[in-house]
Image (tube, grey):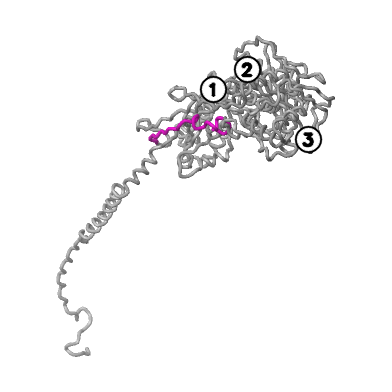
Amino acid sequence: MSGGGPGRKVPGPAGRRPQKPAAPRRPAPARRPHTIRLGSPRPRLRLVSLGLTFVMLAFVVRLLQVQAVDASAYSAKATENRFASHTLAAERGEITDRKGVALATSVDAYDITADPKMFTPQESKAPDAPEQAAALLAPILGKDAKAIAGLLKTKNTRYVVLARRQTPQVWNQIKDLQRVFAQKATADRKNNGPGANVLAGVFKDDSSKRVYPGGDLAAGILGYVNADGKGGGGLESALDKKLAGKDGELTYAQSGGRRVPTAGSSEKPAVPGEDIELTIDRDIQWAAQSAITEQVEKSGADRGYVIVQDTRTGEVLAMANAPGFDPGDLSRASSAAMGNAALQDVYEPGSTAKVMSMAAVLEEKKATPETHVEVPNRLHRGDRLFKDDIDHPTWYLTLNGVLAKSSNIGTILATGQLGATQPEANRVLYSYLTKFGIGQPTGLGYPGESRGILARPEAWSTSQQYTIPFGQGLSLNAMQAASVYSTIANAGVRIEPTLVRGTKGPDGRFTPAPAPDKNRVISEATAKTLAAMLESVVDDQEGTGTKARIPGYRVGGKTGTSNRVDPATGRYKGYTASFAGFAPADNPRVTVYCAIQNPTKGSYFGGQICGPIYKKVMEFALKTLQVAPTGTAPAGLPVTYEQGS
């Protein structure tokens, strides 16, 4: 064998070294479980504590602000939101006639109100609640749906008025609708619906409504009440403070727009207005209004008026206008008829004014009823040629006859004796006209009343010097004209006319109106003479007022037919027909004055169309006041004289 060195290893089994047995392995140590170690809790607790401290501090600061710093402001705001205040409307006083019969009164009514917050989508559960509610309410309230919807959308308020002074029937219709919608809303909620109720926010406040039991009776005197419940015309306006009273106030707790009965309330009661008792007699007013309305229609006239006055007291028993209006339904009223034309219209009176000229002539002792006055067919004075209403041969009239036949020429001749010169005569006549009340306030204090037109004598034109004595060139109203005849009937003493007898307060105590002013205009003797002369106008066959005769009574009166100034053009167009007088002539109790403007059908003479009205109204008034028939015969003053006597 080839060999090698002794240290060489021989492969193969024979040459292996015996291996040492492996040392036993040590078992691997067991694994320990993984442990999570928490951080220290102290920092976190400090953070939470700090946060809570800030939160609590904020609450404390806010609490101090609410309860200490701004306590009053928040209290007021809370009260404002919780409590509601409503005005308690005072009951308007009645207006009655002299017997206590109501001419204007008030009845229960409701103001229909709403809470706009309850119409928001959140409260009503309907996105278009204002529009839906408005569509339902508009036909009931007679209002525009858009306007109602606009009110229901009003912001920053929980109270709006949708309609004032509605009748109980209107509110009942709204309640019926509310009941239906409430039932639908309840059923809808049971089916998991929104339960919308678009009428839940509609409410009512107690109020009152003005009514006029007689319709258009005495409307010109009474006037009317406007939409705000305040006097808008006539005595409703002039006496509004007395009639209106004082409103009260009710404050109560509310929730959801509804009153909380258990939360208490405070109330300042309303003070009712005073009742006004007028001098008007309802029955006489009806007779006067019926008569003038019928004649205005028959004559195709623009308008007319009748005044009835107690000659002894100055009290106005009737003041009728035609056409009139219903103050309870102004929607049908004409603006031209809504005033009181008997006090507001001014016009030239014509021959009814001649009685003042005669009063001046008699009082100044320039003539007597038997004084002879030769009246030609034409009379030249100044820049005009004057005539009477008819052509005639020379008349031989007494002064009484001048009045009875209503001669313009005779009146010019008579008043020319009042002064040594025409300017002096003018001044004397002017003084009597003013004492009779022409160009002066009547004393009634009625809204819009006219005082008439009477220029001072130095301003009279050449023609006015001669036309004013027979009633042209000056203007007055119907009340002034009636007052002239009442002055003569009252023995020459003028008493300011009155419309109000007194007032009755909430305590039921009656307070008489102040006594009217009185002043003597002419002597008692002159007044009696004039009364006898006025009888000739009616009683004598030569007179122009024979249609005013009343069987059983002595009547004194005067006709008037004057050229009328057209208010539209300022020129003469048409006529004013009138009649004025009193009865019984020997012991006067009642004055009646009638005027009709611009009659276009039939006669336009005062004696023909106003004489019958005078008769009808005077007869009714005498019977109503139970005035006994006259037991004596008329004076029978002469109207004419024989030429050369």
- Distance in Å between CA atoms under marks 1 and 2: 26 Å
Amino acid type, callout 3: Arg
Determine the secondary structure under disc 2.
loop
Q: Which residues are magenta?
A: 231-254
Q: Which is nearer the N-term, disc 3 or disc 2?
A: 3
Q: Do the CB atoms of the residues marked 1 and 2 lie less than 8 Å apart?
A: no
- Distance in Å between CA atoms under marks 1 and 3: 53 Å
Foreground residue, 248 or 250? 248
Determine the secondary structure under disc 3.
strand
Query: Can residue 322 be seen at all in this image of the molecule?
Result: no
**For this view, does 498 lie left or right of residue 473?**
left
Q: Quadrant of the N terminus?
A: bottom left
For disc 1, the neighbor class at 10 Å (few under 14, some 14 to 19, many from 20) is many
Query: Which residue is the site of mark 1?
Result: 96
Query: Which residue is the site of mark 2?
Result: 588
Q: Do the CB atoms of the residues marked 1 and 3 lie less than 8 Å apart?
A: no
Front position among marks 1 and 3: 3
Q: Which is nearer the N-term, disc 1 or disc 2?
A: 1
**For this view, does 468 lie left or right of residue 590?**
right
Amino acid type, callout 1: Thr
Q: Which mark is residue 381?
A: 3
Q: Position of residue 443 (x, y in %)?
A: 57, 30
